[in-house]
Amino acid sequence: MSRWTDIPGWDLPSPENTRRCKSFLKSSFSYNGIENGLRYFQNPSGREGLPLVIFLHGADACGSDNESQISLHDVATVFADEAWQSEHPCHIVAPQYKKGKHWAFPSMLEYVYELTLSYAELFHADKSRLYVYGYSAGAIGIFSFLKRYQIFAAAIPICGATDDTEMEKLTDTPMWLYHAGDDPMVHPDEFEIVYYKETHIGSDVIYDKMSKLGHRNIHYTRIPEGKMRRDYHLYPHCSWVLMGEDTEAKRWLFQQRSSYRADMIQTGD
């Protein structure tokens, strides 16, 4: 067992997730000297103009097996569910970063940018409906990404955090935050990441700052303290479980459209 699954109440995959993982094909993507494995689900209809969803995993799934990013938690494959695909057909891409890397590294942000646009072209996706979601390290990466690039129509960062800089750039992208109030790993308020010697802010503070900055399309599901353990018998960091079951949040994601023209994708550079 890994150090993650040793944690009492850590989220484990269901048999249904194992089945859905089989519909994700293996590939890899290289850009600027960085090559990572990825898994992708391509809607079988062959239709053009479908949404593209990017999933960014947490630190527990980093590596080079090109499997853990979708196999460890059901949340990675929820949009490949047959019922969801019937109502909301889409494509999904789930890259995996290697040990020693992180989604928030500038090189990885650029990598995700290029990967997203490359697969949007490959699948002939609707570039006004590019979506991103992820948990923990993936959510931290999402916040860093949105401060630099504005290509996603909407984002769902789950149990994430960011540094307290350039917060106004986050107001450009619709967001639905998810966090447990008693998350001991990534606190929803202000906390220090010791190994980076940086102060980060969690979803409580992010939501408050975004509201004060006039963000017009931000939602926040804050899971009350004690609810994760009491009602779900889960470690409080695992709020991605509840997001994966939240039909309202998922439908909201797919209702968003970017104001950017498909041929004029803009960035924060």
Image (spheres, rainbow, N blue to C red):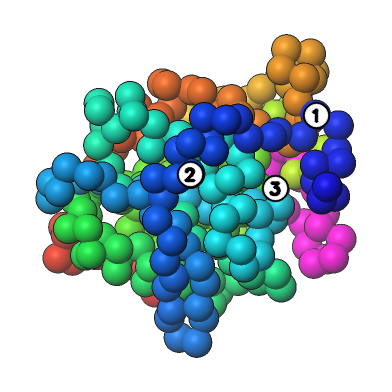
Residue 153 coordinates in the image, percent (x, y) = 32, 47
- Residue 248 drawn above or below residue 196: above
| Mark 3 or mark 2: whose residue is earlier in sequence | 2
Judged left or right of residue 158, residue 84 is: left
Say if the magenta span includes residue 164.
no
| C-alpha separation, residue under disc 3 versus residue under disc 2 | 33 Å
Circle 2 SS class: helix
Q: Which mark is residue 9?
A: 1
> What label sits on residue 201 in the rendered view?
3
Q: Is residue 188 magenta?
A: yes
Which quarter of the image is occupied by the C terminus?
bottom left
Which residue lies at the image location 80% right of the left edge and 42% below the top edge?
5
Mark 2 crowdedness (10 Å alpha carbons): few <14, some 14-19, many ≥20: many
Q: Callout 3, which amino acid?
A: Ile
Region of the chain picked out in magenta, as a range? 187-209
* Residue at figure coordinates x 42%, y 21% from the top left: 247
Amino acid type assigned to the residue bearing label 2 in the image = Cys
Q: Label 3: state its secondary structure.
A: strand
Decide if residue 53 is on the left or right side of residue 169.
left
What residue sits right under mark 2 in the picture?
A: 21
In primary-sequence order, the first of circles 1 and 3 is 1
Picture residue at 70% right of the left edge, 47% below the top: 201
Determine the CA span between mark 1 and mark 3. Answer: 25 Å
Residue 188, by quadrant, is: top right
